[in-house]
Amino acid sequence: MPIDPEYPRIEDHGVLLNNRTAALVSKFGEVDFACFPNFDSQMVFSSILDRKKGGYFSIRPLNKNLESRQFYEPDTNILHTLFTEKRNKIVSIMDFLPMNFEHSVYFSEIHRRIETYADVNIEVDFSPFISSIRKSVEKADGKGYIVFSNDSSQFLSTDLELDIKDDSVCGAVNIPATEVKWVVTTHNLKKAYPPALFASEDRLWQTRKFWKTWLMRSKYQGIYYDVVNRSLLTLKGLFFDPNNFMVASPTTSLPESIGGERNWDYRFMWVRDTSYVIEGLVQLGYIDEATKFYLSIIDRFEKDGKLTSMYKVSEDSVIDESSLDLSGYMNSAPVRIGNGAESQLQIDQYASLIVSLRMLLENSGFLSIHTMEKAFDIGNSLIDIWRDPDSSIWEIRGERRNYVYSKALAWKALVDLAWLHSKMGDEENAASVMSEARQLREEIYGKGVSSKGYFKQSYETDDIDSALLRLPLFGFCTTSDNVYRNTFRAVEENLMPERFLFKRYTLDDGLKGEDNAFLMVSFWYIRNLILNKQLQTAHDGIMMILDLLNDINLLPEEIEFVTHRYLGNYPQAFSHLSLITTIMEYNNAVKTQK
């Protein structure tokens, strides 16, 4: 049975997470994106990127007129998809990726629980792998079906009687009211096993306990509690358990503009992104996650002698950028695997690591003297490179420039590096680094201000850059600084087509397709309002963003102007971190005001 030809909206998806990989499940019961065994492994399900060629695993009622909605089991990443008719429950599907406590042996499984509330006909379509590499199917009587690709296999464990057609598994079955059926799909098993042996109920209990226990460690008790918790659970799920590297998003090539080419693979660890998330997590009490990340990234730095902009989270992936022969979401090609930004110099990657290290140490974190010495080596590298042009936070392809944001964050990192030296009792180096910071600050005010009096995107152009909204957020200047006030107004006038929604920059980056509203910028803007004590306007901005949330409180990278549909890879760590940080700051400002 072919899947529906229409592309489901990005916002009509829940995500399953388990600190090793992820899966998107549409509100129509289809797993349409998943990579096994790891985030950055080969795609097993990818129909969200090509409705004809991509793999999928669909379980849904035969009656297509039923309404459906999704929700998470409270305080977990266990997803429910409920189908109803005139508000009467017909059937629900519960999906989860089990948490793995056998750290040296990883299993890639999606457990799907079908529960009926009425007599219902269910259709099952199991067609893993891109069609060009799907080779054959074997039936294992009473156990399920194995689908083989060129170099791997995907097993469907089920006692449902289905058919084999065109190297796929499909069929319609009647399930009486009040029955429960488990089906499990797993990657690269050597033989078939019946559903009972996968112990789905036990795995469900373990997984439920893990998420609830982890979330109980959060210190947050303020407003919009449920929204913050959903973002926390999402961020935690994006970390890769073996090394605590975090993927920016679990998907690739969901477009930032329909029909454009701004389609990137985000299934990698960016030092900047993870550092930002670490800053947020340590403020909420999650010190272990931060410490493990630092030990991993400092170890990589020591081995390589440098930081790169991004890293593979596992050894499964290919980081060199290439394109697949897929049509892309809503025909938005190319579908990219790997990311060319890996070779870019991005000064703020070095800077972000130093800034978040101070945040960790100021929030009860602890690193050994041996590890701190290695961290100072990263700081020394920053001192060596801050004068160089780079590719900016936006990873602009082409000629490097002296981006003001990169320089300003380097200033913040130098200030924090001086603090670290002082903390370690090295006042001589602390004074030397602070002198370097003062030189950099003077250079920015000398070369980074336009003739109209605003901070410009780079020394080389007068373009306007929304990243500069962060300057007062990390203390480079105050919101009352004359140059910054001009910058704030320039961003509002040139980059805010809709209230609270922003483009990133005015620079023509040469890419096909419009730049839509980048959500992280909206949160930076709202945080500026909070700093200025414009709490009512900040509240309006927060409420506008909350209105954009889908039913399960997940956020993408971008929002399309006017239509407000979700765009870009999903869910996106930057968006969820920014939401948490903004709500925390607003909550604290309101309490202080009282």
Image: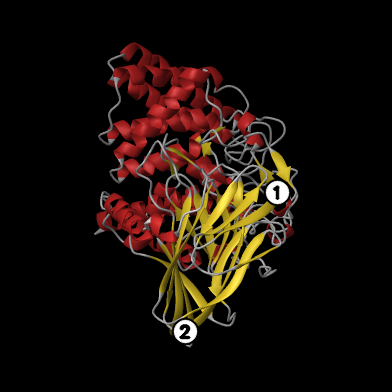
- Residue farthest toward the top in the current orientation of the protein: 428
Q: Quadrant of residue 289?
A: top left
Callout 2: SS: loop
Could you tell me which quadrant the N terminus lies in? bottom right
Q: Amino acid at mark 1?
A: Ile
Which one is in front, 253 or 533? Answer: 253
Residue 516 in sight here:
no
Left or right position of 93 against 405: left
Callout 1: SS: helix
Q: What residue sits right under mark 2 in the picture?
A: 119
Which one is in front, 507 or 175? Answer: 175
Q: Amino acid at mark 2?
A: Asp
Q: Where residue 100 appears, x then y in whole percent?
A: 38, 46
Q: Where residue 460 appears, x then y in whole percent?
A: 68, 32
Q: Residue at x 37, y 44 (%)?
A: 280
Q: Residue at x 63, y 33 (%)?
A: 391
